Structures are given as C-alpha cells and as structure tokens.
C-alpha cells in the first residue's frame, strides 16, 4: 500500500475531503442541503439535526488536525505514537462509517458517501501503517 499511495498524497487528499465535508455540513445546518439526505433521514427535529451536525463538524476538525499534525511530524522525521494511534482510530471510524452508509435508508448516502468513506478508510490505513 505504501507504494500505491504516496504519504503526502494521502495527507493532502484527506485534508481536501475533510474540507469539502466541513462545507457540506455547514450547508446542512444552513438548510441548503435537505436534512432528509443525511443521518439516514432519521433526524426528526431541526435541533436534533444541528446537534448531530455540530458533532460531525467537531469530529472532522479534530480528524483534520490529527492528519495534518501526523503529516508534519513525519516530514520532520519524528514519530508520534499518539498520532499513529489516532490514525488507527480514523481507520476504524471510516470502516464503521462505510458500514453505516451501506445500510443507510437514503440512496444519496448509500451511493454518494459509501465510496468516499471507503477511500478515506484506505487513506487513513495508508497513514497508519507508515
């Protein structure tokens, strides 16, 4: 896997995808994206939706910071066990997210987000094994 995906490409791709997802979640909160296509269409109130979206945004920001820091540490030739553990947590998170998307009630989540979370899981795995 190390030869298939360069380390820097994995870091950059993950940061771009996280940025796009952040924009998406802000658009959900703003009401531009219909709430029926997120969270499996299970959010019954706007307040509940906003709470879940804030958790998503916080998770994305923390993930982006971890990936960025891991990339910077590696470039400096340093090894950080905590950041490596975080990469393995991201692998698990994206695998679970992929499973959730496969079984989503909305076609949009199933067909649009499943491939993205598979790619993120593979990119996180690439970082974790480095």
Image: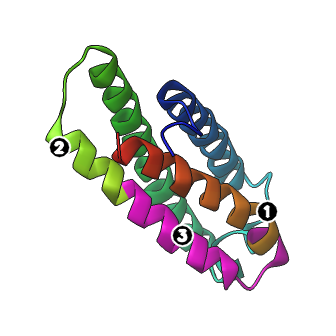
- Prevailing secondary structure of the magenta residues: helix
Furthest residue to the top? 76
Label 2, residues with CA under 10 Å away: few <14, some 14-19, many ≥20 = few
Q: Nearer the viewer, residue 86 or 19?
A: 86
Query: From mark 3 to mark 1, how far is it between C-alphas?
Result: 13 Å
Q: Is residue 63 above or below residue 116?
A: above
| Label 1, residues with CA under 10 Å away: few <14, some 14-19, many ≥20 | few
Q: Is residue 94 magenta?
A: yes
- Name the quadrant of the C terminus: top left
Which numbered disc covers residue 11? none
Q: Quadrant of residue 9?
A: top right
Q: Nearer the viewer, residue 2 or 45?
A: 2
Q: Which residue is mark 1?
A: 112
Q: Earlier in the sequence, mark 1 or mark 2?
A: 2
Tell me, for residue 97, which label it has, or none: 3
What range of the chain is rendered magenta?
90-109
| Residue at the disc numbered 2 | 82
Q: Residue at x 79, y 79 (%)?
A: 106
Spatial separation of the CA atoms under disc 1 and disc 2: 32 Å
Question: In which quarter of the view is residue 10 placed?
Answer: top right
- SS for tag 1? helix
The residue lying at 83 percent from left, 77 percent from top is 107
Question: What is the spatial separation of the Cα atoms under label 2 and label 3, in whole angstroms?
Answer: 22 Å
* Residue located at (44% from left, 37% from top): 64
77 to the left or right of 44: left
Q: Quadrant of residue 77?
A: top left
Q: Residue at x 79, y 62 (%)?
A: 112
Badge 3 element: helix
Residue 29 is one of the magenta-drawn residues: no
Judged from the image, the secondary structure of the residue bearing numbered disc 2 is: helix
Q: Residue furthest front?
A: 3
């Amino acid at each position: 896997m190390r030869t298939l995906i360069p380390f820097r490409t994995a870091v950059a791709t993950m940061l771009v995808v996280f940025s796009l997802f952040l924009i998406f979640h802000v658009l959900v909160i703003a009401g531009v994206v219909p709430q029926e296509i997120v969270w499996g269409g299970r959010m019954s109130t706007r307040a509940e939706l906003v709470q879940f979206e804030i958790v998503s945004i916080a998770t994305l920001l923390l993930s982006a910071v971890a990936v960025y820091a891991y990339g910077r540490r590696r470039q400096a030739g340093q090894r950080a066990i905590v950041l490596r553990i975080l990469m393995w947590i991201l692998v698990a998170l994206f695998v679970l997210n992929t499973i959730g998307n496969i079984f989503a009630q909305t076609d949009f989540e199933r067909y649009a987000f499943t491939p993205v979370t598979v790619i993120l899981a593979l990119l996180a795995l690439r970082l974790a094994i480095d």
